[in-house]
Image (tube, rainbow, N blue to C red):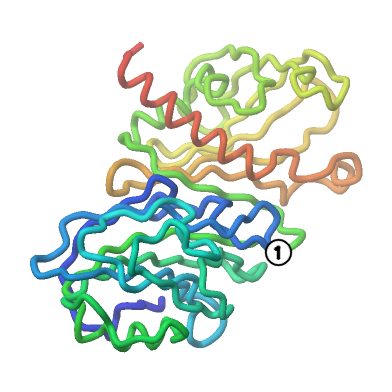
Amino acid sequence: MNDPFARLPEAASFTVTSATITDGAALPLEHWSAGVPGGKDVSPQLSWSGAPDGTKSYAVTVYDPDAPTGSGFWHWAVAGIPATVTELPEGAGDDTGSGLPEGAFQLPGDTREARFVGAAPPPGHGPHRYVIVVHALDTESLAVPAGATPALLGFVMTGHILGRAVLTATAETPLAGTERIEVSRLVPAPADAVFAVLTDPAGHVDIDASGMLMAAEGPRVRQAGDRFVVHMDRAALGDVPLGKYDVEVVITKLVPDEEIAWTVEGRSGAHVRHIYGYRLEPADGGTRVTSYYDWSEIAEEWKRHLTFPVVPESALKATLGILERTVRRRIAQPQ
């Protein structure tokens, strides 16, 4: 994997955080390119602390080392940030740099626009990393003209960097026809607390983002093959006149505190056999939870009758947010 820091001089680490981006998680849609449906080219909020003594200014860069260019792709570069500044508000990197402090300026990135340009990874190219760096510098001013490239900025900065604060987000554009969706979120809780919600039939109702799940019946699931009943109400969506009905959730995979997956069976007829699931991985600050929806093994008859995915990516993201809230509540109020 391309390491953007592999051949750069070592520098002290300090801390950068964001109210709009989570380190290691998927890049929110507002930080994607406006050329992508839903993208807005909005620069992220950034706050930093703990810069080394002697810091006299900062620079901020956003770089995609995974772009298929041979040289990566620069999305944003800001120089001349005074040492007294430790935050950039969301949207600071617009066309005018309206949220930048006095003295700071934006350099043209690889689109040659002097502003923040959001993510737009090519379809099917896999996940891209968006490496956000706050550079602490030992000089108040760099001899870099406003029209210089971010690469030139990086070259000139090399001898002046005292410290780096790094935050990395990811983005991926699936190929048209891809039959699987995955989204991730850092949940600030241990894996067993998250898994306790996912193995509890009532937990599935608690984290539902669709509004269709009314109630669930059955014991906690412990292994593949376990089942429980969910009472549904399609009228909550108002799209298909199915009304109220029951389905059985059938566990297809269960590895304690690591992964759970299931399919849904109706009371009659052939089953769709699409798969829902969660993977859990330990991470700094909690558990990285990946929600996935896979419809690659459904029969052709279902492809003719339904439009897939029946669950959009936005719903998976919403459910992860509700999952975090539910886990927090259950930890605070043990059942």
Label 1 sits on residue:
175
- Few, some or many residues within 10 Å of mark 1 (<14, 14–19, 20+): few
At which x and y percent is residue 51? 16, 62
Q: Residue at x 86, y 48 (%)?
A: 300
- In the figure, 65 relative to 330: above or below? below
Whole-percent x and y of residue 292? 58, 45
- Residue 215 in the image: above or below residue 285: above
Question: In this rendering, would 39 be left or right of 128?
Answer: right
Residue under the image location 32 percent in, 21 percent down = 331
**Image location of residue 251, percent across then percent down:** 57, 32
Instruction: Look at 74% across and 44% down and name the residue there.
Output: 309
**Quarter of the image holding residue 328?**
top left
Q: Please identify the residue farthest to the left as the structure is shown.
A: 53
Kindly identify the residue that appears in the image at 26 percent across and 63 percent down. 165
Q: Quadrant of the C terminus?
A: top left
Amino acid type, label 1: Leu
Residue 11 vertical placement versus 18 (above, below): below
How far from the left and from the top, in percent, is residue 323?
Answer: 47, 30
